[in-house]
């Protein structure tokens, strides 16, 4: 859980759901954060994760959040979030090149896979790379199984609503930019039918959990 004590804010971050952008916004209003004192990183946005680590949901931690705090989370369309795991962590950051399990031959997997190979072998890559596992886990492992515990749930498509609400809550101007945005675009249309079939069980569970916010499943999933 990420807290900004001065403004009574509690936020549960979901990987690849604008968490870098939201963390930067919270840091800008957190009196306990001194940006100039933060260490430098290869990727500038990593400094926000250094002060606000993303953690899995734990009921006993969330239950102690006072009722008068502003509690929220941000979710993302399951396909877009999963595609971003590949475009950002695998292609742009080259996370698989740092996998000791692949280097040591524990897993015989290429470190620069094409998207079809990656997603058809996603479970193997999850076991080989903690970064891939972290960024491709189910939403509820980070938000908890009941989204009603939050005052507000935002989608990445409507971050503007979060900007308005945070500004009103803190009585200051809050801005949310685009941190860690993938430059590569990838959709289900770019994948082979057998790849989509391999991802369908995971995606269907995600869309089922987020049905209130994402009612329409991609056509490719409905056809299988």
Image: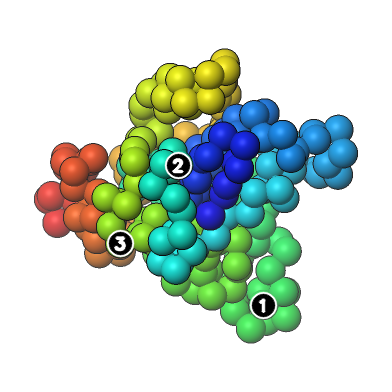
- The x, y position of residue 58, in whole percent, is 45, 66
Q: Is residue 25 visible?
A: yes
> Can you tell which quarter of the image residue 111 is in?
bottom right
Q: CA distance from mark 1 to mark 2?
A: 43 Å
Eyeballing the image, is 218 above or below 202?
Answer: above
Tell which tag, 3 or 1, sits nearer the viewer.
Answer: 3
> Can you tell which quarter of the image residue 216 is in?
top left
Q: Is residue 197 visible?
A: no
Q: CA distance from mark 3 to mark 1?
A: 32 Å
Please, what secondary structure does the residue beneath circle 1 have?
helix
Estimate how packed mark 2 is, as few (under 14), some (14 to 19) or many (20 or more) residues with alpha carbons within 10 Å: some
Tell me the number on the disc at residue 190. Answer: none
In percent of the image, x 51 and y 40: which residue is there? 9
> What residue does disc 2 label?
69
Please, what secondary structure does the residue beneath circle 2 have?
loop
Among the two numbered marks 3 and 1 on one chain, the one whose residue lies closer to the N terminus: 1
In percent of the image, x 86 and y 33: which residue is there? 36
Viewer-side residue, 50 vs 26: 26
> What residue does disc 3 label?
145
Residue 59 is left or right of residue 128, and the answer is: left
Report the residue that reaches farthest toward the top.
Answer: 173
Q: CA distance from mark 2 to mark 3?
A: 20 Å
> What residue does disc 1 label?
101
């Amino acid at each position: 859980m990420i807290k900004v004590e001065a403004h009574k804010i509690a936020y549960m971050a979901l990987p690849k759901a604008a968490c870098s952008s939201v963390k930067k916004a919270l840091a800008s209003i957190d009196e306990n954060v001194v940006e100039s004192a933060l260490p430098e990183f290869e990727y500038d946005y990593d400094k926000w994760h250094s002060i606000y680590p993303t953690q899995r949901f734990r009921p006993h931690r969330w239950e102690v959040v006072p009722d008068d705090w502003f509690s929220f989370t941000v979710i993302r369309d399951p396909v877009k979030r999963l595609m971003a795991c590949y475009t950002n962590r695998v292609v742009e950051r080259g996370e698989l090149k740092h996998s000791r399990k692949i280097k040591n031959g524990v897993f015989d997997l290429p470190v620069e896979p094409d998207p079809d190979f990656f997603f058809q072998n996603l479970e193997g890559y999850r076991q080989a790379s903690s970064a891939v596992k972290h960024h491709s886990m189910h939403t509820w492992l980070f938000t908890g199984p009941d989204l009603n515990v939050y005052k507000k749930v935002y989608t990445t498509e409507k971050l503007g609503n979060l900007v308005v609400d945070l500004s009103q809550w803190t009585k200051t101007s809050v801005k949310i930019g685009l941190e860690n945005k993938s430059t590569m675009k990838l959709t289900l249309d770019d994948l082979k039918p057998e790849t989509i079939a391999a991802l369908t069980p995971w995606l269907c569970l995600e869309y089922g959990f987020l049905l209130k916010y994402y009612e329409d499943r991609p056509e490719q999933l409905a056809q299988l």
